[in-house]
Image (cartoon, rainbow, N blue to C red):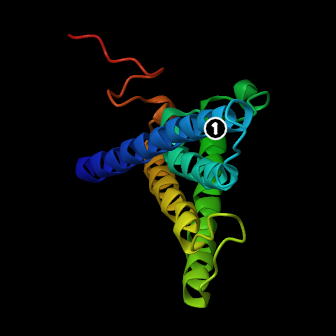
Amino acid sequence: MRLVERLIHWLCALGVAIAAVSVLLSLALIGYSVVMRYFVNDPVPWVDELVGYLLVVSVMLGAGEALRRGEHISVDIVTEKLGPRGKRIAQLFSVAAVALTAAILVWQGWSTAAFSRMAGVISNGYLAAPMWIPQLAVPVGAAILLLMALAVFVAVLCGDPDALKKSDHGAPGGTARPPR
C-alpha cells in the first residue's frame, strides 16, 4: 500500500509541477501580449486562446494535489458540529463524491478527446490547434484526482481522520513532523 501511496503522491507532484509551469507560461504570454498590444501596437491574437488552454491544464492537473492537501472548497459549518463518527462519515461521503465526479470526468473527457481526434476537430481560433490535445488535460487531471480520492477514501476508512490534511511528511497542516 505504501508503494501505491507514493506513486499517487508522485503523480500529484508531477501534475502540480506541470500546472505551475502552465501558470507561469500564461503569465509570460499575457505579459508579452500586453507589451505587444500597448507598446509596439502589434497585438498577438493567439495568446488568449493558448492561455485558455493553459488554464484548463493548470486547474485539472492541480486538482489532485489540492485534494491531497485538503485545500478543496468545503463548507464546514455543519461538519464542525459533528462528532468524530459523523465527521468520518461526512468525509467518506465527500471523498466518494469527488471520486465519482472524477470518474465521470475521466470517462467523458477521454470520450470527448477521442472523438475530437477521430473527427479531426480543430479550434476555430487563431491557433487552429487539434482540440484533442488540450482536451486530454481533463481526463489526465481527473485520473490523478480519482486516484488521490480513492487513496484518501481508503485512509479515512482505515481510521485516519486527517487524511485530507497531510503533507508529504504525513503531518497535519503541511509541516514536517518534529524529529524524535
Quarter of the figure with residue 17: top left
- Please state the horizontal and vertical placement of residue 78, each as a whole percent of the image: 78, 31
**Residue shown at the point (65%, 55%) measured from the top left:** 46
> Mark 1 is on which residue type?
Ile
Query: In this picture, is 136 found above or below 88?
Result: below
Q: Is residue 143 left or right of residue 11?
A: right
Instruction: Identify the residue position indicated by label 1 in the image.
Output: 30
**Residue shown at the point (76%, 33%) measured from the top left:** 75
Q: Residue furthest left?
A: 180
**Residue shown at the point (45%, 40%) measured from the top left:** 21
Query: In this picture, is 151 found above or below 13?
Result: below
Residue 161 at least partly seen: no
Q: Is residue 77 left or right of residue 121?
A: right
Residue placed most toward the observer, 83 or 30: 30
Query: In this picture, is 178 found above or below 123?
Result: above
- Please state the horizontal and vertical placement of residue 155, each as a whole percent of the image: 43, 44
- Please state the horizontal and vertical placement of residue 111, each as a whole percent of the image: 59, 80
Q: Is residue 103 left or right of residue 177?
A: right
Quarter of the figure with residue 114: bottom right
Query: In this picture, is 37 found above or below 15?
Result: above
Mark 1 surroundings: few (<14), some (14-19) or many (≥20) residues within 10 A: some
Q: Residue furthest right?
A: 77
Q: Residue furthest bottom?
A: 119
- Please state the horizontal and vertical placement of residue 76, each as a whole percent of the image: 73, 29
Count of marks, rendered view: 1
**Residue shown at the point (51%, 56%) measured from the top left:** 141
Residue 142 at least partly seen: yes
The quadrant of the picture occupied by the C terminus is top left
Q: Is residue 149 left or right of residue 116?
A: left
As helix, strand or loop, the secondary structure at mark 1 comes to helix
